[in-house]
Amino acid sequence: MDEPFVILCGLGYLEVKLLEEVSKLYPTVALDIDPIKINSLKEQFKNCEFIHADASSILTWKKLDLKNLTAIITTFKDSDVNLEVCRIIRLNFHLDKPIIVLSY
């Protein structure tokens, strides 16, 4: 993306509500491993990019252009998955961008 953008990891109920708000402020890229969820939201969020991928995989992050990344939001219920996303971003890409982790 050529402009600042946010990555949202996962598309559960809470994440869709976040997507509604965040996408008003920034172009947003949403990652989810469920293609059915992605397809069900594409019509509602035409200004967002949806990627069928595993946010806890380094392979996913290697395929993304992170040059203009502003922030990452991860809200997985499994804290190990949230931790892995943070580890990948910090240790492998050395990105000094905010990572917002909402744990519930």
Image (spheres, rainbow, N blue to C red):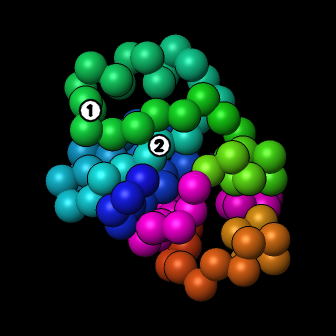
Q: Residue at x 74, y 72 (%)?
A: 93
Query: Is tag 1's residue or tag 2's residue first in the polypeptide sequence?
Result: 2
Looking at the image, residue 83 sits to the left or right of residue 13; the answer is right
Residue 66: % across, % down: 56, 62
- Assess whether residue 67 is covered by the magenta stretch: yes
Circle 2 residues within 10 Å: few <14, some 14–19, many ≥20: many
Residue 46: % across, % down: 25, 30
The residue sitting at the left extreme is: 24
Residue 10, numbered label: none
Is disc 1 placed on a helix, strand or loop?
loop
Q: Residue at x 33, y 39 (%)?
A: 48
Residue identifier under label 1 = 45
Task: Report the amino acid beneath label 2.
Answer: Ala
- Please state which of residues 12 and 94 is positioned toward the viewer in this rendering: 94
Q: Are marks 1 and 2 in contact (CB under 8 Å)?
A: yes
Is disc 2 placed on a helix, strand or loop?
strand
Residue 30, numbered label: 2
Splitting the image into 4 quarters, where does residue 92 fall? bottom right
Q: Quadrant of the C terminus?
A: bottom right
Mark 1–mark 2 Cα distance, whole angstroms, equals: 10 Å
Q: Is residue 31 above or below residue 86?
A: above
Looking at the image, residue 40 sits to the left or right of residue 32; the answer is left
Task: Report the amino acid beneath label 1.
Answer: Phe
Q: Is residue 46 above or below residue 40?
A: below
Highlighted range, magenta: 65-86
Looking at the image, residue 56 sits to the left or right of residue 34; the answer is right
Residue 59: % across, % down: 80, 46
